[in-house]
Image (cartoon, coloured by chain):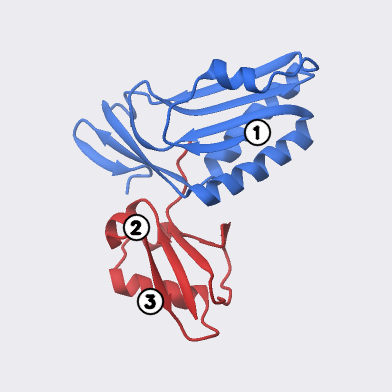
Chain colours: A blue, B red
Amino acid sequence: MIKIQKDDFSVDVELKKIKNDECGASVIFVGTVKSPMNGKKVVKLELDAYVEMAEKRLREIEDDAKEKFSIKESTIIHRYGELFVGDNIVLIIVKSIDRTKSFEGAKYILERLKEEVPIFKKEYLEDNVLWHGGI
Amino acid sequence: MKVIVKYFAIYKETTGVPEEAFELDRGKSINELLNIIIKKYNFKDQDSIVVSLNHDYIKKDVKLKDGDEVAIMMPTSGG
């Protein structure tokens, strides 16, 4: 299941949605807004997203991960909009019959998400505002 | 032909609009459209422009078709 949304998510609720008794291993990754970043206190982030393309890209990544790591169930949610320190940004849940494959599958999804999914962070730091990448 | 261009992140701020339509002569390519946009808005940091066509990243120049959706973005930073 793929979602790009402004609203927060509940890990418990999302985990229950993909209950599968064949899977003995569920790996959950939750990314949150951190502070400091590069030594600077973070006030907030604004995330811009190309929602249609991000969902298409995530579906491709999820399909590839399912095939490579024998994943039975998965959930990928990425938020956009205004987010403050401690807020959830991204949730990845991977369920497989094998724990090693579950860990590897979650890592694979996260790394490809960071590289390919069109979501852009604007960082509001204590003394500066800049798009991620220093622009 | 009509092509929709969507802007994201710093390019949405620079242009002041999330999207706009361009009327182009048949046979125009992505690079020709990009040159029109760069000139119109005087984009800086042109090396960091990332382009997609109909929700797929584009690395080579391609001819555009009526109804195409182009997006002007920067490198991703999600996760």
- Asked if residue A99 is positioned above or below residue B15 in the image, the reply reads above
Q: Identify the residue at horizontal 54%, vertical 19% (top origin).
A: A11
User: A28 and A131: which one is in front?
Assistant: A28
The residue under label 1 is which amino acid type? Tyr
The Cα atoms of the two marked residues, 1 and 2, are separated by: 30 Å
- Asked if residue B63 is positioned above or below residue A114 in the image, the reply reads below
Q: Identify the residue at horizontal 56%, vertical 39% (top origin).
A: A113
The residue under label 3 is which amino acid type? Ile
Residue A53, percent from left and from top? 54, 51
| Residue labelled with disc 1 | A108
Describe residue A23's horizontal placement relative to residue B40 as left or right.
Answer: right
Residue A94, percent from left and from top? 67, 25
| Residue labelled with disc 2 | B11
Which marked residue is nearer to the observer: mark 1 or mark 2?
A: 2
Describe residue B9's horizontal placement relative to residue A50 as left or right.
Answer: left
The residue under label 2 is which amino acid type? Tyr
Q: Are marks 1 and 2 on the same chain?
A: no
